């Protein structure tokens, strides 16, 4: 039940090592061991997407992946996007402008999915944005502010190379 | 009244940066050294006597700190106090007696029977699975109808039956009107609501201080002062030794986080028992099983009307499922919402609320209102059909005119005050909604599509929403030693942006810059009294309190500055963090210096200068005389795929009037979120319980919530009829978006499927139900 294993991974650019229980999920490891509490747990059923982080650049459900499965990977969380409150990324700044956040509990996961998606496709259409967001549940906003934030960002973005 | 022009401006929220960078302060994010973790042992049965709880195996597990059952917590096993009395004179609510842990029997599947606390949540859950509970299973009642049937199993034996309340309200002479009307119609509607499903579940951390015999409780609650009152009662402590803090970030509330729950008492008891902080975080399954919900109401409604389409009388009789515990807020509000924006002078309104062996109920965003709106708006559609009139035209013929305010409906609202609408312009609201939707063109397009065999429907719904309920909310404003204005108010936000909106009101009223204002909410240690965030009430209660205290604080600041500047207070102005003599920009004193004198600072000797009072602080409590009444008009244009039963929304127009608006960005966000919740109720969410009270849809896979792909783009406009019942002229917007959505969608689906003769009398309208309707028609 409490079998452990040593893992090492890179989290937001910082090498991190730890001994974790085999059963510990990645999101619990990030939140409890590394105290990166910006990633939240909304359902533990792989549906709501609040726990989404990037593993080697791809969005994953932190509640469905074990920490040991992330051994040797590069993990990005919402804390890694902006250096501080005064220097938001363009995506974060558009979220402020378009009121894409209300309670903010689901926001970290949503930003990570959008970040990955915008790297591949910097000028998504509204339908593409909604498809990306479809991996997430938000009970506050009705999503429209988020969609508008990404549309505004896309309008100013260079076309993909 | 306003000085800086912040009130009414779409100012981006100051909350956002921390939430967007992962630096929020949700309960489970707080660093609590030495914290132990609780896991609840929950009954798998909806109705059962607890015969024996064997904790031996669980106790033996390493890392387990304690396992606690009802016997252990005997010192706090008091009967919970009765909840809200009936607001309607001559009627009463019958309260079943509940305890923190069940004394004899469990009353819903998911009720806590014991609690395990361990070094980690995982260990606590391991041990929980080893706790053996022997139950004697009793027959359950899982619907209001089953609970009200003769010979039904009793949820509370002491009541003799399962009736929680039977409340009748009457206006005029409905029987006479029905007897003489040209037309009458009678229908039965089944309306489902659902759970709150805030993305953050319930969450509580408690710390006990032995030296002071006091608790500090961080709680993801909508009502910290009410939680304090319950904890103080159960633990027999004065309220000042229980400090409940809703942290600045609570991950949604939507109603159920207003209630007090056993877990809050248990975590406190354990923290005192262990002399360690204890945390409990609700997981999603627990939210499905044990957080309060709203469930189905079944209405039988009759209307009487003339051949010209004038509504003469309304008779609405319905049942409401209270679950094993709950306040009667929702059905009282439902009853009062049915008459809506229409002149109807003869009303018989009656409901029976029944205890069942299902989870407790509370208000969920809308709090009984969407059900009431659906009932009335469905009947307006049916009246239009009967008379061969357009659904919008039937509504226009019955709307209360703009010059009829204040308009008394004749009923008593949930706040105990007469149901009297304060202000509004319903015809203009509906007219503009139809204009933006280009209603005549939409009807033409519908006719063309129908000729091609396609199923387009148009739904129109308009409603009135009782908002801004009292009794009060308060504010303390002070100028701190840095020269900053600190606003403290009791009700905590769950995403509504109080830190921004409260600062806007305070900055304008004190006359300082927005950035010079800090806002503290939800801390019983910071303001003695508060009610909470529910009933779309905070802007209309806390807003005027902040405005009042802000004006008072300004006067105090100017009085102290007048002394420092040797000038008359009337000649002073506050500009850029300083008080200056008007017209003499170099004669000024920084606010921080004013604070040092006004708050009795050390720099000014031992004696306050003559006439000056100590304390740059002002507090105010605002208690509205009654609720205010917001209004909404929605137009929904949708296509139904008759093969799959799927609905595609083509356009969705929202007209909204909540009086004066403090921050349009925030209000629009509230409405957008409310519409999403309404669409979720209209098309997706449905709770399923079997006849033994077992939840058959307890994951987001079985109980779908809409994602961005299912949500249409919402087109919105505002109408502003200021409320006369508070000095800011504000009403409420938190729940508004939700209310008319099920009605508008139901109307549109029935309209789309008119060629089939489909009757929409039950919600939600998921593809399976629509297909079923088509096949049965």
Image (cartoon, grey):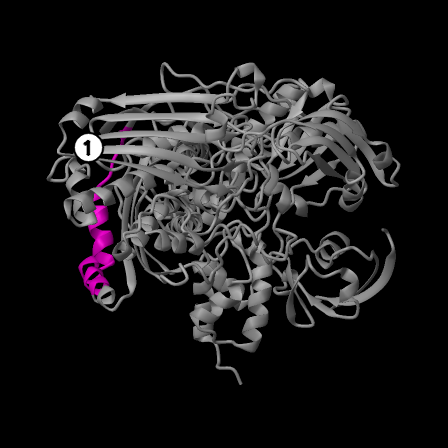
Q: Position of residue B595 (x, y in %)?
A: 53, 36
**Disc 1 marks which residue?**
B304
Q: Residues within 10 Å of mark 1 (few under 14, many from 20)?
A: many
The number of discs equals 1
Residue at the image position 50 percent from the left and 53 percent from the top: B705
Q: Nearer the viewer, residue A92 or B573?
A: A92
Question: Does any portion of residue B169 appear in the rendered image?
Answer: yes
Numbered range of the magenta stretch: B420-447
Q: Is residue A60 left or right of residue B179?
A: right
Q: Nearer the viewer, residue A93 or B636?
A: B636
Secondary structure of the residue carrying tag 1 is strand
Is residue B386 part of the magenta span, yes or no? no
| The furthest residue to the bottom | A161
Picture layout, residue A9 above or below residue B663: below
Picture layout, residue B756 above or below residue B152: below
Residue at the image position 82 percent from the left and 57 percent from the top: A22
Is residue B423 part of the magenta span, yes or no? yes
Res. A144 image quadrant: bottom left
Residue at the image position 43 percent from the left and 56 percent from the top: B767
Q: Is residue B461 left or right of residue A152?
A: left
Q: Position of residue B462 (x, y in %)?
A: 27, 44
Picture layout, residue B751 above or below residue B287: below
């Amino acid at each position: 039940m409490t079998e452990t294993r040593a893992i090492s991974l890179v989290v937001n650019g910082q090498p991190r090592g730890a001994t974790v229980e085999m059963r510990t999920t990645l999101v619990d490891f990030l939140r409890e061991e590394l105290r990166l509490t910006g990633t939240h747990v909304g359902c533990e059923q792989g549906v709501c997407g609040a726990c989404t982080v990037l593993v080697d650049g791809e969005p994953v459900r932190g509640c469905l992946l074990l920490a040991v499965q992330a051994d040797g990977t590069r993990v990005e969380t919402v804390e890694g996007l902006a250096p501080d409150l005064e220097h938001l990324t363009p995506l974060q700044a558009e979220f402020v402008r378009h009121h894409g956040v209300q309670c903010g509990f689901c926001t970290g996961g949503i930003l990570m999915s959008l970040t990955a998606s915008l790297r591949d496709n910097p000028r998504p259409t509204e339908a593409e944005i909604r498809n990306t967001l479809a991996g997430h549940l938000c009970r506050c906003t009705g999503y429209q502010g988020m969609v508008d934030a990404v549309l505004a960002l896309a309008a100013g973005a260079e076309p993909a190379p | 009244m306003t000085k800086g022009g912040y009130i009414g401006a779409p100012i981006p929220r100051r909350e956002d940066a921390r939430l967007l960078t992962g630096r929020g302060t949700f309960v489970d994010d707080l660093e609590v050294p030495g914290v132990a973790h609780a896991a609840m042992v929950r009954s798998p049965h909806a109705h059962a006597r607890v015969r024996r709880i064997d904790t031996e195996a669980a106790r033996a597990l390493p890392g387990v700190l304690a396992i606690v059952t009802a016997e252990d917590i005997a010192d706090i096993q008091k009967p919970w106090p009765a909840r809200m009395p009936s607001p309607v004179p001559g009627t009463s609510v019958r309260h079943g007696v509940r305890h923190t842990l069940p004394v004899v029997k469990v009353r819903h599947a998911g009720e806590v029977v014991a609690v395990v606390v361990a070094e980690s949540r995982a260990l606590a859950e391991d041990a929980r699975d080893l706790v053996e509970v022997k139950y004697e299973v009793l027959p359950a009642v899982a619907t209001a109808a089953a609970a009200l049937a003769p010979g039904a199993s009793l949820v509370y034996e002491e009541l003799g039956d399962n009736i929680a309340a039977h409340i009748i309200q009457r206006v005029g002479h409905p029987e006479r009107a029905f007897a003489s009307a040209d037309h009458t119609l009678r229908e039965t509607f089944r309306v489902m609501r659902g759970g709150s499903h805030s993305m953050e579940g319930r969450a509580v951390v408690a710390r006990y201080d032995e030296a002071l015999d006091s608790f500090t409780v961080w709680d993801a609650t909508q009502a910290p002062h009410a939680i304090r009152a319950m904890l103080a009662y159960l633990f027999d402590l004065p309220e000042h030794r229980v400090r409940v803090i809703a942290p600045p970030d609570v991950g949604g509330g939507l109603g159920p986080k207003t209630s007090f729950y056993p877990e809050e008492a248990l975590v406190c008891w354990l923290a005192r028992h262990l002399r360690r902080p204890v945390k409990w975080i609700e997981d999603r399954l627990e939210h499905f099983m044990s957080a309060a919900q709203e469930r189905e109401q079944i209405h039988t409604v009759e209307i009487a009307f003339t051949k010209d389409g004038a509504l003469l009388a309304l008779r609405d009789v319905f049942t409401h499922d209270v679950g094993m515990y709950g306040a009667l807020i929702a059905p009282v509000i439902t009853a009062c919402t049915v008459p809506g924006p229409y002149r109807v002078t003869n009303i018989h309104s009656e409901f029976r609320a029944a205890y069942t062996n299902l989870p407790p109920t509370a208000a969920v965003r809308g709090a009984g209102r969407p059900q009431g709106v659906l009932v009335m708006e469905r009947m307006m559609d049916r009246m239009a059909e009967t008379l061969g009139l357009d659904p919008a035209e039937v509504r226009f013929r019955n709307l209360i005119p703009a010059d009829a305010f204040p308009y008394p409906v004749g009923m008593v609202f949930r706040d105990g005050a007469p149901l009297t609408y304060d202000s509004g312009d319903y015809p203009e609201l509906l007219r503009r909604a139809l204009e933006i939707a280009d209603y005549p063109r939409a009807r033409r397009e519908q006719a063309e599509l129908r000729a091609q065999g396609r199923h387009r429907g148009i739904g129109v719904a308009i409603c009135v929403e009782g908002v801004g309920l009292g009794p009060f909310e308060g504010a303390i404003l002070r100028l701190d030693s840095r020269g900053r204005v600190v606003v403290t108010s009791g009700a905590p936000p769950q995403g509504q942006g109080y830190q921004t909106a409260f600062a806007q009101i305070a900055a304008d009223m004190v006359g300082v810059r927005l950035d010079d204002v800090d806002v503290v909410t939800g801390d019983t240690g910071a303001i003695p009294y508060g009610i909470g965030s529910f009933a779309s009430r905070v802007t209309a209660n806390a807003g005027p309190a902040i405005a009042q205290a802000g004006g008072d604080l300004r006067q105090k600041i100017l009085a102290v500055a007048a002394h420092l500047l040797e000038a008359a207070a009337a000649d002073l102005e506050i500009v850029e963090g300083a008080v200056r003599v008007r017209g003499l920009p170099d004669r000024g004193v920084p606010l921080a210096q004013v604070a040092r004198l006004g708050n009795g600072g050390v720099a000014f000797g031992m004696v306050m200068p003559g006439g000056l009072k100590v304390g740059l602080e002002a507090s105010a409590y605002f208690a509205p005389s009654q609720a205010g009444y917001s209004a909404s008009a929605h137009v929904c244009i949708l296509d139904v795929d008759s093969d799959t039963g799927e609905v595609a929304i083509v356009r969705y127009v929202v007209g909204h009037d909540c009086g004066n608006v403090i921050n349009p960005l925030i209000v629009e966000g509230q409405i957008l979120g409310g519409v999403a919740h309404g669409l979720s109720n209209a098309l997706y969410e449905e709770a399923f319980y079997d006849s033994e009270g077992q939840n058959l849809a307890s994951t987001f896979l079985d109980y779908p919530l809409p994602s961005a792909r299912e949500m249409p783009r919402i087109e919105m406009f505002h109408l502003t009829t200021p409320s006369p019942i508070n000095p800011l002229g504000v009403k409420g917007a938190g729940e508004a978006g939700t209310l008319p959505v099920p009605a508008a969608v139901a109307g549109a689906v029935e309209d789309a499927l008119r060629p089939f003769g489909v009757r929409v009398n039950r919600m939600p309208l998921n593809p399976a139900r629509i297909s079923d309707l088509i096949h049965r028609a």
